[in-house]
Image (cartoon, rainbow, N blue to C red):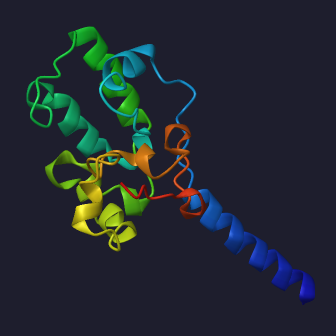
Amino acid sequence: MNKLLMVFIALLMTGSVLAAKMPMPSDMPKSYDAECASCHMAYPPGLLSDKSWQNVMGSLSKHFGTDASIEQKDQLEITNWLRKNAATRQKYSELAPENRITKTSWFVRKHDEIKADVWKRQSIKSPANCGACHSGAAEGIFSEKNVAVPAK
């Protein structure tokens, strides 16, 4: 009985750690880094659903207020890779409102304690700047243990 309890506790602890990791798939195309990460963080594809990535990549000419159009070959390569690696867990697989990670219900729930003025701090600028508070964001680590909200 004691061993069973220890295994159960270990599984619970591992689950919360795994939930905070969203590693970048090893087959990331160079075009994703060159095209997408040149303007913002290379978001792990598991943060959005297949349909949401399809919507994002299908509207690059109006990509959050800018024209982010890219060569069709690169667009197809990136789109296929994002869709192949899109969210499969139900909590991430909803259709993202306005195609924004920051508008998904799981993101809003995880950040509900952050006041609006915090997002506007010079060192943060917007909720989309994951790396401002999550030191491991570039590696797909979003653990609450590694969060440091900048004071300014």
Which percent across, then down, holds residue 139? 56, 39
Vertical side of 62 occupied by 71: above or below? above
In the picture, measured across the screen, residue 118 lies left or right of residue 56, that is right
Q: Residue at x 38, y 22 (%)?
A: 32
- The extreme front residue here reads 152
Vertical side of 69 occupied by 55: above or below? below
Which percent across, then down, holds residue 133? 45, 52
In the picture, measured across the screen, residue 68 lies left or right of residue 102, that is left
In the picture, measured across the screen, residue 58 lies left or right of residue 130, that is left
Image quadrant containing the N terminus: bottom right
Which percent across, then down, holds residue 137? 50, 44
Q: Residue at x 49, y 51 (%)?
A: 134
Choose top left, top right, bottom left or bottom right for residue 73. Answer: top left
In the picture, measured across the screen, residue 132 lies left or right of residue 76, that is right
Q: Nearer the viewer, residue 137 or 150?
A: 150
Label tally: 0
Image quadrant containing the C terminus: bottom left
Which percent across, then down, holds residue 78? 34, 23
Q: Nearer the viewer, residue 116 or 103?
A: 116
Q: Residue at x 39, y 67 (%)?
A: 110
- The extreme bottom residue here reads 1
Vertical side of 65 occupied by 17: above or below? below
Q: Residue at x 61, y 67 (%)?
A: 16
Choose top left, top right, bottom left or bottom right for residue 13. Answer: bottom right
